[in-house]
Image (cartoon, rainbow, N blue to C red):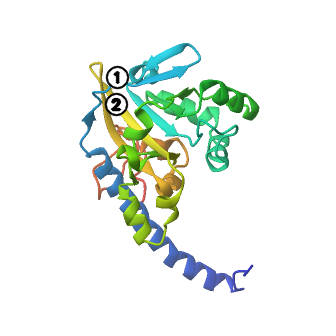
Amino acid sequence: MSLPRIASRDEWRAERIELLRAEKELTEQRDRLNARRRELPMVEVDVDYEFEGPDGTVGLADLFEGRPQLILYHFMFHPEWDDGCPSCTAGIDEVSRGMVEHLHTRDTTYAIVSRAPLQKLQRWKDQRGWFLPWYSSGDGPFNYDFGVTIDASRGFDEYNFRSLDEYADRGEASMKTAEQPYDMPGQSCFLMVDDRVFHTYSVYARGLEGTGGSYYFLDNTALGRQEDWEQPAGRSASLRRGQPDFAS
């Protein structure tokens, strides 16, 4: 493992300031990207999806738990597996009650959906000590329609908006040659307006790596962070209650 070179305090400061310029550019670019995400059109969900939860069969609208926004994590758990995906498991391990409470204060529910039977999900949930609501979509259309179950024989031959042929052309032939159907990770966001459910956003693959604290989750939703200091892209955000502007 290589270590940083040793420098004087003045050299460190000069290079840190130069790096800060790049960090500010990245922050401003992210602000613009978040604004574009909020402006993305939404699509009404017109399929009566069914899920199995602790209280029996429920619909997609029930997963909102009375809040207007819903973030669903597509957790990789094949129906034939006994354990959940290690990578997905590591991600859910890091979700804290405090973070979810912060989402709830912004009227946003966070839940998990997988194809495995509810009994397997509940066993894994109990083993990991998780508190999040977890639902089974079974082999219904939900996972297929939202791009996380791949089965070319049924016409679902795309992941992260690329076809399996495109992955093969990129040197990732295993995406095409792996035994199907198989599952992949993702996150989908939904908005409820006048009892109508809309799909607003989905993110897959390495795009999931940018999901950190509650603000980063909210950045993927149609309503964003819901702060009254949120400004259009390209403008610095001024805090509430007369506090000074954030430096971009």
Identify which residue, 214 or 126, lies in the foreground: 126
Residue 31, horizontal then vertical, whole percent = 36, 55
Q: Earlier in the sequence, mark 2 or mark 1?
A: 1
Q: Residues within 10 Å of mark 2 (few under 14, many from 20)?
A: many
Provide the residue designation for mark 1.
48
- The answer to whether any part of residue 229 appears in the image is no
Q: Quadrant where the C terminus lies?
A: bottom left
Indicate whether 4 appears above or below 133.
below
Indicate whether 203 appears above or below 42.
below
Asked which quadrant contains residue 133, the reply is: top right
Residue at image x 58%, y 40%? Answer: 78
Q: Quadrant where the N terminus lies?
A: bottom right
Tell whether 86 sits left or right of 13. right
Residue at image x 30%, y 56%? Answer: 235
Amino acid marked by disc 2: Leu
Provide the residue designation for mark 2.
191
Residue 94, horizontal then vertical, whole percent = 65, 43
Tell whether 137 sits left or right of 99. left
Residue 37, horizontal then vertical, whole percent = 32, 49
Q: CA distance from mark 2 to mark 1?
A: 16 Å
Residue at image x 56%, y 13%? Answer: 55
Residue 98, horizontal then vertical, whole percent = 62, 33
Residue at image x 69%, y 86%? Answer: 7
